[in-house]
Structure formats: C-alpha cells, structure tokens
C-alpha cells in the first residue's frame, strides 16, 4: 500500500536517547512544539489514554493465557490489539492543538466507533439479562476488563472536562464512551466463555449482620 492510499501517515521519528532533560522544569511539548505544564488538562488526558493502553496490553496477556483456544479467543485478541492502536491514534490527536492537526494525522474515526458497536453486539447477544449490578470477579480476564472499564470512565471524565476549555474532536468522546461500554459487556462475556458465575451485587452482604 502506497503512502497516498493509507488513511494516516506512518510515524516519522527516531528515539535514540531516553532522557533529554527538557522536562526537568515540569513542562513538555505538544506535537506543534508548544511547551505546556505536565499537569495541564490536555497532558493529563492523553497521559490517561497511555495508561489505558497499557492496561489493555495487560488484559491481552490474560486473554491469551486464560481463554480457551478457538475462534472467540482469536477474534478477541485481534480486537484488543486494534484498540491499543486506536488508543495511540487518540493520544496523537489529543497531543496536537487543533490548528496543528495534519489531514492524515492518526485520530479516531466514526468507522472505529461503528466497528466497536458491532463488537459489543456480537458478545452481548450471548449474555443472559442482568438482574443486579455485577462486581469484578470470577476470572482474571474479567477483573482486568473491569480495571480497563474504570480507567476508561476516568478518561471519559477528563475528556469531557477538557472540552469545556479546549476544542476536542467529538469522535474521541464518543469512542471512549463506547469503549467503556464494551469493556463492561466483554467482562461478562469472558466469564461465560470460562464457565464462571458472575459476581452479583448483594447489598446485604455488606452489612454487619451478614
């Protein structure tokens, strides 16, 4: 595939030195070269994108280790790898101010959201109706998915907060909202694959009388 046929530009960078000392005064650079504080809302937001991507990588290890071999496992491993790349695309666009965005710069596309919705529907069809809220548990893959879900929800809150002061691509917010839904559905789905019961919330187990 030629560069003209690709949706996004390939990376053009060389990382030869790990430390540069340029951030020693608490500032870092955006893609456009602007120096901003490391605790700014934009940096906090795409830093959390990076955090979520790392958790998805850890989740992929759990899936590879724990899920039974078969089409579902192969499919899900591919989905998680795709999400890791999409999260990096999201980080790229969040690290860039609107005026500096290149037409072929990696970003989240509406097609990414639509594909995620199909992935959710594929797994949700196999699930029984919920009669209570669920807790993390039953399998390591389930708990890792719940961790991804909660980090994803935190990222969503940061994204929404960022939109109050700065311009943010609307597809980014929609994608992260849908991704957190996906992690929830998949947390239930993996327990079905592993034949593990769901851990349902029982309010009375939290009392002193239990």
Image (cartoon, rainbow, N blue to C red):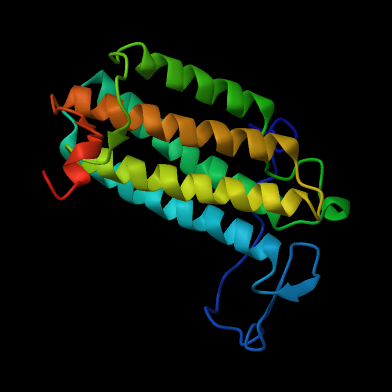
Q: Position of residue 9 (x, y in %)?
A: 70, 44
Point out the image quarter for the N terminus: top right
Q: Residue at x 55, y 82 (%)?
A: 19
**Rendered position, 171 above or below 21:** above
Q: Nearer the viewer, residue 95 or 74?
A: 95
Q: Quadrant of residue 197?
A: top left
Q: Residue at x 81, y 54 (%)?
A: 166
Taking the view exactly as shown, the residue that stands out farthest to the front is: 209
Taking the view exactly as shown, the residue that stands out farthest to the top is: 125
Q: Nearer the viewer, residue 118 or 164?
A: 164
Q: Residue at x 30, y 45 (%)?
A: 144
Q: Quadrant of residue 104?
A: top right
Q: Quadrant of residue 137?
A: top left
Q: Nearer the viewer, residue 165 or 205?
A: 205
Q: Position of residue 167 (x, y in %)?
A: 81, 49
- Tell me if 39 is positioned left or right of 51 in this view: right
- Tell me if 105 is positioned left or right of 103 in this view: left
Q: Nearer the viewer, residue 14 or 148?
A: 148
Asked whether the viewer can see residue 108, the reply is: no
Q: Position of residue 78 (x, y in %)?
A: 39, 31
**Rendered position, 59 above or below 195:** below
Q: Residue at x 65, y 83 (%)?
A: 26
Point out the image quarter for the C terminus: top left
């Amino acid at each position: 595939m030629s560069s003209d046929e690709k949706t996004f530009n390939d990376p053009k960078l060389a990382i030869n030195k790990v430390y540069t000392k340029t951030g020693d005064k608490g500032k870092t650079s955006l893609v456009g070269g602007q120096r901003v504080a490391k605790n700014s809302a934009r940096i906090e937001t795409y830093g959390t994108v990076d955090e979520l991507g790392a958790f998805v990588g850890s989740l992929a290890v759990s899936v590879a280790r724990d899920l039974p071999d078969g089409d579902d496992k192969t499919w899900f491993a591919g989905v998680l790898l795709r999400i890791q790349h999409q999260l990096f695309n999201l980080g790229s666009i969040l690290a860039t101010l609107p005026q500096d965005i290149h037409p072929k710069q990696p970003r989240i596309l509406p097609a990414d959201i639509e594909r995620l919705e199909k992935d959710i529907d594929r797994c949700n069809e196999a699930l029984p109706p919920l009669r209570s809220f669920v807790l993390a548990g039953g399998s390591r893959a389930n708990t890792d998915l719940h961790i991804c879900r909660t980090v994803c929800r935190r990222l969503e809150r940061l994204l929404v907060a960022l939109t109050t002061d700065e311009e943010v691509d609307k597809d980014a917010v929609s994608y992260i909202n849908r991704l957190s839904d996906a992690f929830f559905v998949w947390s239930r789905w993996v327990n079905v694959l592993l034949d593990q019961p769901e851990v349902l919330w029982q309010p009375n187990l939290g009392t002193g009388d239990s």
